Image (tube, grey):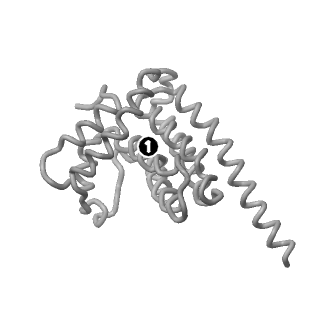
Amino acid sequence: MFSNARTSQILLALASQPGERLTVREIMAVLQDRAFALLVVLLGLPNCLPMPPPIPLVCGLLLALVAVQIVFGREAPWLPRQLLNRSMARTDVERAVGRAVPVFRRLERISRPRMTFLDTPLAMRLMGAVILILSVGLLFAPPFVGQIPLGLAVCLVGLGLVERDGFVVVGGLLIGTIGLTLSLGFVYAIFTGIDTLI
C-alpha cells in the first residue's frame, strides 16, 4: 500500500485512522515496510531542538534498539509488548502530524530516489551500524544543545531511507560526523577534568 508513498502521505494515513485512540501496535501496522526508517526519523526529531536530560538518553537507547534490529536484518521492528499496547489520543497524533507534514513536504520537494544502491539489504544493515554509532553519540552528547547535530543527522538518514534518497543519507552522515566529534570532545573534556581533580 505504501511502497511508493512519500513520508507525508504515510503520516497523513496515520492521522486518519479510526477510533479515539491509537495503540503503538496500530501505528506500526500503518508504517508497514517503512517502519524502521520512520522510527529513526521520529526518534531523531526531539533532538533537533535544545532538550534537557534525559530526552537524548531515552531517544538514544530506543534508537540503539532499532539500529541493532536493522543490523540483524529483521523485516519489522520488535518492540516490547507493554510498549506496543500503549495508546495515545488520535487528536494528539493529528496535532503532531499537522505540525510535521509541512516540513516533510518541503523536504520532499528536493528529495527523490538517488544513489539507490543504498536501498539494498546489505546497505540497510550497514546503515543500521551507522545509526547505532549515532545513537551512542546521543548517549554522550553535551546537554541541552550538543545533541542537535546528531538529531539532525538521524532525521536526515531516516528521511533518506524512507524516500530512498542516498544523497540525503550522505548529508546526514556528514552532519553526524560533526555531532560525533562534539560528543567525543565532550567525553574527553570530562575525563580530562576528572584526571586533573585526581
Relative to 8, say whether 99 is above or below.
Answer: below
Q: Which x, y percent locates residue 74?
A: 39, 47
The percent coordinates of residue 170 (x first, y second) are: 58, 31
153 displayed left or right of 177: left
Residue position marked by numbered label 1 in the rendering: 41
Along the viewing direction, whichever of 174 and 152 lies nearer the viewer:
152
Outermost residue on the bottom side: it is 198
Using a 10 Å C-alpha cutoff, classify the residue at mark 1 as few (fewer than 14 neighbours), some (14 to 19) or many (20 or more).
many
Say whether residue 185 is left or right of residue 99.
Answer: right
Tag count in the figure?
Answer: 1
Identified at 61% across, 53% down, the residue is 145
* The C terminus lies in quadrant: bottom right
Q: Of helix, strand and loop, which one carries label 1?
A: helix
On the picture, is 114 further left or further right than 16? right
Quadrant where the image shows the N terminus = top left
| Residue at 33% in and 63% down | 80
State the residue at coordinates (13%, 46%). Answer: 18
Position of residue 108 measured from the top left corner of the image (x, y, whole percent):
41, 25
The residue that appears at 29% across and 66% down in the rendered structure is 82
In the image, residue 138 sits, relative to residue 173, either above or below, namely below
Q: Position of residue 142 (x, y in %)?
A: 65, 58
Image height check: is 116 above or below 67? above
Between 73 and 158, which is closer to the camera in this rendering? Answer: 158
Q: Amino acid at mark 1?
A: Val
Q: Residue 132 versus residue 145: which sits nearer the camera?
A: 145
